Amino acid sequence: MQRVLKVLFTTAVTLVFGFSAWCQYPGWQQKADYTMDINVDVEKHQYTGSMSIMYTNNSPDDLDKIFMHTFFNAFQPGSMMDVRSRNIEDPDRRVGSRIVELPADEWGWIKPGAMSMNGMPCQIEEDGTILIATLPAPLRSGVTCKLSLNWTAQVPRQIRRSGWMNKEGVEFSMTQWFPKICEYDHHGWHSNPYIGREFHGVWGDFDVTINLPVGYEVGGTGMLKSSRQEAKKTGKWHFIAENVIDFAWAADQDFKVHTEMVDGIEMNFIYQPNKEYNKSWKELPRFASSAMRFFNEFVGQYPYPQYTVIQGGDGGMEYPMITLVTANRKLPSLVGVTVHEMAHSWFQALVATNESLYEWMDEGFTSWIESECMEILPSFSTEGENVEPMQGGKHSWAYKSYLGQAKSGNEEPLITHADHYTTNRAYGVAAYSKGEVLMNQLGAILGDSLRNEGMRKYFSDWSFKHPGPNDFKRSMERTSDLELDWYFQYFMNTTHTIDYAVKEVKSEVMTTTITLERIGAMPMPQDLLVEFEDGDYIQYHIPLVIMRGNRPLEGNEKLAEDWPWTNPTYDITVPSMGKKIAKVVLDPDLKQADINLENNIYTR
Ligand SMILES: [Zn+2]
């Protein structure tokens, strides 16, 4: 989703789910193939649904219950999402107290009818946004069953992501809209009550038929079985999507559709006519196709046959093969949100980490490739412009945001469960900004080129597998042949910060001894630039002992002795050969999120 950060600060009390933070992919995962038939009453904003799910239990455990998400139930006064939104000190302005103020005919709800497993009735219990089905007999390990369920639903007035009539007048934004099986993985069940934040889901094939009155235009996850014209004429919208973790759609009678092929992928742009903003939408495909090509090369090939950017929702939100974005924006904002949501395809949709546990592996990595991509887009690049070097370079916004939060004392560690950060701001900074910094800062340890290669390896090794942080760490270690456990332990599990300083410069006749100091608790390898008065310079790379190696050296860079993390200071002797030193700079490329840059420089 798009970043929404508010400038509010609080004392942080952290709820940490550290026990699961390092778990890695065990080699199995569940599968759920859905066939759904949906009939929409557009006047009442209600629909009926019937579905069968072929659910395969690939886990080593026998299951006696199935948990399902019924997200729409969050849009009722007194729901956990409503109460949370009214009690958090920096509420999301899109939600605030809007749920408690909804009249009953604008609530959202999902009412299950009969549910069965292989024709035998299940016992159903409703618990807010979770439906618990007790199975008539345990579903054994390795066995596939057929779950059948009918339900009726009321679509809420659009508040967060989903609903009818968003603020731009889109009739239906249909996301998190059907009863969806919770993921069961090596951590166990993930029956998180929906409070409006992150997701986790089961891979599967979707066969979805949506019956609407004639005249609607629809965009959705997957490929249409018929032509768009025929679907519009009959009101029967039949989508097929293979190997996805979710299914979303949006519908409106005024939508216009523009389609183009990019690298063999059908890209659809669907939006309402609007005099003021349609010119942004006419320009958008050019930028979106450049972004698609960039991500295919930078991270790995997008494997699905189509991608849709559709007007809807309340900002920008990613789903497999589709994003819903608000449309009434000037071009830079429309391009920015589209590039961000598209970038999610490589993480939210394809690698699909558990976003509730590892929100930074989705939002952070997405923000990182988004910033990389924006630099290559015509009229967005700052390359060649005469701008002051900024900490974090292309990612300076993320560094600034993370460092501001770290200095405020209200930072909460990255391993905090996404739903449980004490403020929206602490969540936003951790997930988006610190996640982006974590990724970019690997360039200071591995070098940028091996970091980028490591990202490609991670994507190719872990697509369609729900990896965890340890799997990501191993991809980076295998690519670089360096040990990186310390980096993740510090940056993910703690709020320790980086602060290195040039402490002292002592010149003898032929040599100069430079004393460096680690002030912050977090160790990092260091790059050191020594400039002489005659313009000559020497560059050193100083690895940490615990890396068991060093990144490839660049140019004339010299490899210095390893720095043991236990040692607060480090001396390096430079052959100055009688020349005077003009300047000594730590981390001259500004890759590290060092909280105090002033002490990184010594000038004579
Ligand atoms: Zn996002």
Image: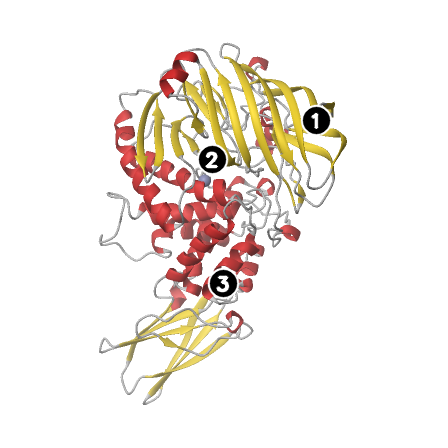
Q: Secondary structure at mark 1?
A: loop
Q: Amino acid at mark 2?
A: Pro
| As drawn, 538 above or below 417 | below
Between residue 123 and residue 417, name the one nearer to us. 123
Q: Amino acid at mark 3?
A: Arg
Circle 1: is it few (<14), some (14-19), or many (20+) Cα within 10 Å? some
Question: In the picture provided, is 280 more to the left or to the right than 403?
Answer: left
CA gap between label 1 and label 2 equals 29 Å
Rendering quadrant holding ligand 1: top left
CA gap between label 2 and label 3 equals 29 Å
Circle 2: is it few (<14), some (14-19), or many (20+) Cα within 10 Å? many
Between residue 135 and residue 77, name the one nearer to us. 135
Which of the numbered marks, if any, corresponds to residue 478? 3
Contact (Cβ within 8 Å) of mark 2 with mark 3: no
Q: In this figure, which residue is indicated by the disc labeled 1? A: 118
| As drawn, 492 above or below 563 | above
x%, y% of residue 343? 41, 42
Q: In this figure, which residue is indicated by the disc labeled 2? A: 320
x%, y% of residue 466? 56, 46
